[in-house]
């Protein structure tokens, strides 16, 4: 597990409990569908759901089969060459239904692993995960940046990247990497009713 940048609140504890209870009901939703939770392991044709943003000569994005997938067979492979300022980026627009019965809170997480492929100037990989209002250039609602060191090459770590009050309308899951290669799997965003 990666070091969290924020302390866990009672809503975070409630989210983990709710996710455990409803874990079997997580579903994959296309941008036109709405659900209370979205879980994407890049299976099927991920290019139907995710949009790549790469810069020729500076970064590469592949949504592909990989032997080190955390679950299933596919991952997102984001690679940006140091010392470039350009990033390798993917994003996906989703809509989440409001859970019934009062105010709702939403969370986002993904599983990350640094690739052990050596680059000319090995640096810590910087991965930014965010939720944006509307499209990929919309207002950033919440997000986190993680630095993956060589210690993160052996296994996936959980990156809890978003915690925000429910918002109607489309949201964009935005993931980017700089200065190295990262494997991304099992991206999830879910909303639950707050407990008073």
Image (cartoon, helix red, strand yellow):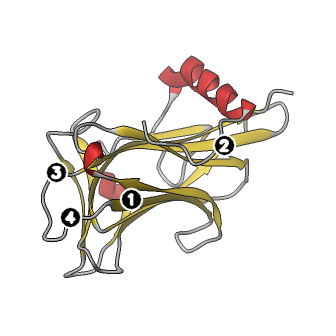
Between label 3 and label 2, give the one nearer the viewer.
3
The mark found on residue 61 in the picture is none
Mark 3 vs mark 1, CA separation in Å: 25 Å
First in sequence, mark 1 or 2: give its number: 1
Label 3, residues with CA under 10 Å away: few <14, some 14-19, many ≥20 = some
Q: Position of residue 178 (x, y in %)?
A: 34, 68
Q: Nearer the viewer, residue 182 or 104?
A: 182
Q: Secondary structure at mark 4?
A: loop
In terms of sequence position, does the residue under pointer 3 or pointer 2 come before the other? 2
> What is the x, y in percent for residue 174?
48, 61
User: Residue at 50% across / 30% down in the picture?
Assistant: 26
Looking at the picture, how far across and down is residue 50, in whole percent?
Answer: 38, 59
Give the spatial CA distance, label 4 vs label 1. Answer: 28 Å
Crowdedness of circle 4 by 10 Å Cα count: few (<14), some, many (20+)? some
Q: Quadrant of the C terminus?
A: top right
SS category of the residue bearing label 2: strand
Residue 147 lies, with reference to residue 151, above or below; the image says below
Q: Which residue is mark 4?
A: 122
Q: Nearer the viewer, mark 4 or mark 2?
A: 4
Q: Nearer the viewer, mark 1 or mark 2?
A: 2
In this rendering, the label closer to the viewer, 4 or 1: 4
Mark 3 touches mark 2? (CB < 8 Å): no
Q: Secondary structure at mark 1?
A: loop
Disc with the residue nearer the chain's start (4 vs 2): 2
- Identify the residue shown where x is 60% and y is 27%: 16
Label placed on residue 106: 2
Report the front residue among 41 and 11: 11
Say which mark, if any, is on residue 50.
Answer: 1
Q: Judge whether 15 appears above or below 171 on screen.
A: above
- Residue at label 3? 116
């Amino acid at each position: 597990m990666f070091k969290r940048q924020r302390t866990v609140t009672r809503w975070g504890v409630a989210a983990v409990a709710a996710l455990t209870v409803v874990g079997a009901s997580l579903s994959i939703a296309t941008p036109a569908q709405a659900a209370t939770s979205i879980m994407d392991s890049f299976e099927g044709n991920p290019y139907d759901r995710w949009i790549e943003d790469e810069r020729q000569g500076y970064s590469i994005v592949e949504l592909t089969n990989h032997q080190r997938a955390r679950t299933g067979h596919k991952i997102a492979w984001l690679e940006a060459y140091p010392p470039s300022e350009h990033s390798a980026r993917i994003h996906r627009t989703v809509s989440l239904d409001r859970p019934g019965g009062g105010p709702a809170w939403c969370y986002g997480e993904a599983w990350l692993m640094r690739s052990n492929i050596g680059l000319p100037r090995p640096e810590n990989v910087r991965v930014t995960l965010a939720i944006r209002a509307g499209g990929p250039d919309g207002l950033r609602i919440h997000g986190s940046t993680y630095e993956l060191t060589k210690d993160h090459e052996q296994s996936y770590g959980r990156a809890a990247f978003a915690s925000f009050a429910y918002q109607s309308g489309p949201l964009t899951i935005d993931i980017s990497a700089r200065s190295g290669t990262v494997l991304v799997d099992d991206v999830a965003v879910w909303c639950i009713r707050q407990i008073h």
